[in-house]
Image (cartoon, coloured by chain):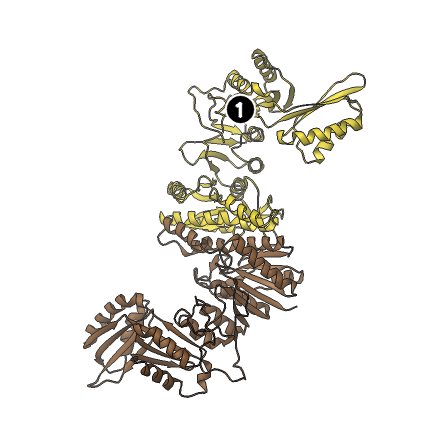
Chain colours: A yellow, B brown
Amino acid sequence: MPLLVQKYGGTSVGTVERIQAVAKRVAAERARGHDMVVVVSAMSGETNRLLAMARAIHPNAPPREVDVLLATGEQVTIALLSMALEELGCPAKSYTGAQVHIRTDNVHGRARITAIDDGRVRQDLASGRVVVIAGFQGVDEEGNITTLGRGGSDTTAVAMAAALKADECQIYTDVDGVYTTDPRVCPQARRLERITVEEMLELASLGAKVLQIRSVEFAGKYRVPLRVLSSFDDGPGTLITYEESKMEQALISGIAFSRDEAKLTIKGVPDEPGVAYRIVGDVAHANINVDMIIQNVGADKTTDFTFTVPRGDYRQAREILEKTAVALKAREVRGDERIAKISVVGVGMRSHAGIASTMFRVLGEEGINIQMISTSEIKISVVVEEKYLELAVRALHSAFGLDAETATVVPLA
Amino acid sequence: MPLLVQKYGGTSVGTVERIQAVAKRVAAERARGHDMVVVVSAMSGETNRLLAMARAIHPNAPPREVDVLLATGEQVTIALLSMALEELGCPAKSYTGAQVHIRTDNVHGRARITAIDDGRVRQDLASGRVVVIAGFQGVDEEGNITTLGRGGSDTTAVAMAAALKADECQIYTDVDGVYTTDPRVCPQARRLERITVEEMLELASLGAKVLQIRSVEFAGKYRVPLRVLSSFDDGPGTLITYEESKMEQALISGIAFSRDEAKLTIKGVPDEPGVAYRIVGDVAHANINVDMIIQNVGADKTTDFTFTVPRGDYRQAREILEKTAVALKAREVRGDERIAKISVVGVGMRSHAGIASTMFRVLGEEGINIQMISTSEIKISVVVEEKYLELAVRALHSAFGLDAETATVVPLA
């Protein structure tokens, strides 16, 4: 019998009524002849309620106890969903992360799954039950409860699907799939029928927050067929694939962008080995994420060095850089918080030249100056003035043939 | 180091502030040089909140899933209390019932503890930690979460104390001890310094709902020194003992009563073997608890038969009895819902004659007619008209020398 793993997030199970709706959807798939494993999150709002109590007691609560506390959230949901399924005449059994032996390391708050024992689940499925599993949580070697951190329920679902060799892992969320870009910025955005895992990773890391990166990485590693769907609308969603289609494929799958960027330039540093490390290293040691890095060829045995950081870390990064500048006897430090990063993503660009030149031409025609450029095998990113973001996204969306024939406006996240 | 097991009920941990107050009390005992194990219930109101959601989903939810749901209540409390202890600089570690291996049978909703593995707890105590344990819950052989039913947290505390051979098991509640009778009925009631476990059992089963019977039985079986105290006032509470004091002891320890009684009489049934079974059996098969049973000596080869049932089951019991009466060709069925049961309890009566006669004389002097009498080794119970309840309790309390010198009015439960 084909096996589906479905995952429902906090919004999808946010009330008793929504839990009943999820039960109906699951029971219907079961009736269609699928073996069903369902992974659920805490009811929306519950995690915040619990954390508020914790914070009132301890400003910096021990992570082990925070995990004990938060794990109750999904435990409530698995019990209620199992009851709702039983009420529909659909035999069901719930498991906490510990009960289903989702073994993790002992890094509380962001544990990583190391092993899953699928014996119990297979036994329940064989006896005709729907298996309901608490997402986001596991258990370490010593029996301590752990949580997987943000998006952990997605990871649980993908890991279960991998362990059970499920036919498909369906992530139900409040959006109906992955879009070519954010429909709030570009009304012509359309839902992708399919996307490769590499494209998904590039889009996810660039701001399309449909799925957590870790779960997509996990899915890629174990080749789990992954589908993103809406729990509020019917529709096929977006399938994440691992092989490039043999059919002709669009060059570009989507356009990602981020406003959460700031740019820092240090000018006139010595053009000699070790300087790049000095500059980036000092910032990175402060736990600031350095994204794009560009070193221009300089003159007079000096060079200029530009990199981007998250906008919230701009001030701190600038202070660090001023100190580095003094130490390196650099000419000056400049910064700009009003920038945006725009990326075109697509596995198609591997075999097609000219994507970059098209991108630069389109932006030039719109009078948009490109401040930085960075490329990877399936992605080209540029930094532009923030005020051009919407114009640039729409122009590129159209130029790369992504526009929907009829506009669909669904918020992305 | 002396080891204390303390148990705090739902009211004692009902808010963040109360959890912090419990932490202070625990940390103070720790500072006084005690090894501390703390057993807690769900925050008051939490169990009802969870059950309301369950009922909205399934009128008769599967007991396994109800247990999964309810067990989250104590899990929240153990995490918060451990955080509160850590915040006070008192190292603490929480355990769910499953984590500390409180092994039970698989009767969901009213499981019985079969074994406890004390290894982890001893290890934590040895390393200087306070151990915080979720009451009310355990785990069966297959790893399913179970709950122990009403008062289960008391049972958890006593079982932990027995397993760890604790020096004392302290049950913190919202009353400051066991009273000679209910102070709301008799303002002269006073707190007992100590009471034997047998007396406690009789008083508990007769309506002094300070401790659950099962936990007292458990304490008696393993001879766990048990103390009932208030978490809101300081004070020594009441110690439950296992040996009769060598000092002179009051004949009577307390006076229990219950309004939750109704009386049924079947008249003129054949005075022959098997009849009692027919009458009581039919009622008991309907899961109605039959309490006092009296068979009067009859005439004409017939006899009369009277018994009491919980008042809520009166109508159903009467219907059953009417049918039995037809089958047995009995003369008539009579019933009375307006009765009360009053019991005097005390191990002292074992060695002293005359308790019964004193009791009957006192009631007679007050003009109170006794409808039924039943006796055990340390208890004499009578049934009287309900309207005489307060008068009877006060008269007996005084006659048996239980009155406090100064009145203390603290509600019993």
Q: Viewer-proximal residue, A1 or A104?
A: A104
Provide the chain ID for the residue under circle 1.
A
Residue A203 position, x and y percent, is 56, 28
Residue B365's place in the image compared with B66, above or below, is below
Residue B152's place in the image compared with A260, above or below, is below
Q: Quadrant of residue A297?
A: top right
Q: Viewer-proximal residue, A358 or A272?
A: A272
Residue B149's place in the image compared with A373, above or below, is below
Residue B292's place in the image compared with A394, above or below, is below
Q: Viewer-proximal residue, A342 or B242?
A: B242
Q: Secondary structure at mark 1?
A: strand
Q: Residue furthest top?
A: A365
The amino acid type of the residue labelled 1 equals Gly
Residue A37 position, x and y percent, is 46, 44
Residue B198 position, x and y percent, is 47, 77
Q: Residue placed at 70% from the left, 35% from the top?
A: A286
Which residue is tagged 1? A254
Residue A289 position, x and y percent, is 66, 32
Q: Residue placed at 73% from the left, 28% from the top?
A: A321
